[in-house]
C-alpha cells in the first residue's frame, strides 16, 4: 500500500516545541525539508499541511495544531477530504518503549497508551494506519512519563533522536512509492 498521508504528532506552540512528545512534528518537518515542501497552516484541516507531487508520487504531510489528545480531528479531516484510507496513513510519534534514537515501522495495532493514537483510532474508525515509532527512552517509572515526555531531551539524546529522524525521513519517498519492505529493512537494521 502506498503511503499518501504522513502525520507527525506533537503539541503546538513554543512551550512544547523542543519536548520529546513533539518527535512526530520533528519527523514531518524533516521530511518537508528533504522534499522541499512548505508546511502552511490550514484552518479547515486543523494543522499545518504540505503536499509533495513528483514522478507519480502524491504525498500529503500534516502537523496537527490541536493538542496531542485531539489529534484525530486533524487527521480525520484531511483523510476524509482527500479520500485517504487508513491503510495509506503513516503516523509518526514519540515512543517511550523504544530506546532513544531507535525507530520502528509498524502496521496497525492499538494505541499502546499513547494519547495521540488513542484519539486517532476512533476518529478514523480504524486501527489500520501505519506508525513510525520514534524512540525517546523511558524515565524508569510510569508515574514520571508525563513529565518526561513534556520536557526536552538532553543534548546527546536529541542528537540520537535527530539521527534516527534523518534516517527515517530518507525513507519517505520509498514509503510513498509503496516500498514498505525496503524502508523497514533500512530502518530496522540501522546501527
Image (cartoon, rainbow, N blue to C red):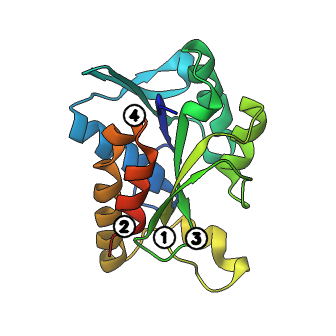
Nearest the camera: 178 or 26? 178
How far is mark 1 from mark 2, CA to CA? 7 Å
Helix, strand or loop under label 2: helix
Q: Which residue is found at the position 43% from the left and 70% from the top?
A: 102
Contact? badges 1 and 3 (CB < 8 Å): yes
Of mark 4 and mark 3, the one earlier in the sequence is 3
Give the Cα distance between marks 4 and 3. 26 Å
When the figure is inspected, residue 81 is found, relative to residue 66, above or below; the finding is: above
State the residue at coordinates (67%, 35%): 72
Q: Residues within 10 Å of mark 1 (few under 14, many from 20)?
A: many
Residue mark closest to the camera, 1 vs 4: 4
Are the residues at dot 3 and dot 2 in contact (C-beta closer than 8 Å)? no
| First reached walking from the N terminus: tag 1 or tag 2 | 1
Cβ atoms at labels 1 and 2 below 8 Å apart? yes
Q: Residues within 10 Å of mark 3 (few under 14, many from 20)?
A: many
| Residue hosting label 4 | 176
Residue at the disc numbered 1 = 136
Image position, residue 158 (x, y; %): 34, 70
- Identify the residue position indicated by label 2 in the image: 161
Image coords of residue 155 (percent x, y): 30, 76
The span from disc 1 to disc 3 (Cα, nearest Å) is 5 Å
Identify the secondary structure beneath mark 1: loop
Point out the residue furthest to the bottom here: 140
Amino acid at each position: 500500500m502506498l503511503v499518501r498521508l504522513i502525520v507527525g504528532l506533537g503539541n503546538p506552540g513554543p512551550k512544547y516545541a523542543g519536548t520529546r512528545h513533539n518527535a512526530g512534528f520533528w519527523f514531518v518537518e524533516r521530511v518537508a525539508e528533504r522534499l522541499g515542501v512548505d508546511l502552511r497552516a490550514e484552518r479547515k484541516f486543523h494543522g499545518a499541511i504540505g503536499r509533495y507531487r513528483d514522478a507519480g508520487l502524491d504525498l500529503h504531510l500534516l502537523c496537527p495544531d490541536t493538542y496531542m489528545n485531539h489529534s484525530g480531528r486533524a487527521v480525520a479531516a484531511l483523510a476524509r477530504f482527500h479520500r485517504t484510507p487508513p491503510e495509506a496513513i503513516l503516523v509518526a510519534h514519540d515512543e517511550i518503549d523504544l530506546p532513544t534514537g531507535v525507530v520502528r515501522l509498524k502496521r496497525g495495532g492499538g494505541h499502546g497508551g499513547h494519547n495521540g493514537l488513542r484519539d486517532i483510532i476512533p476518529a478514523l474508525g480504524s486501527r489500520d494506519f501505519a506508525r513510525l515509532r520514534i524512540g525517546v527512552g523511558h524515565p524508569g517509572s510510569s508515574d514520571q512519563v508525563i513529565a518526561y515526555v513534556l520536557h526536552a531531551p538532553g543534548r546527546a539524546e536529541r542528537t540520537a533522536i535527530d539521527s534516527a529522524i534523518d534516517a527515517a525521513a530518507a525513507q519517505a519517498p520509498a514509503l510513498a512509492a509503496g516500498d514498505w519492505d525496503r524502508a523497514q529493512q533500512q530502518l530496522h537494521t540501522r546501527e
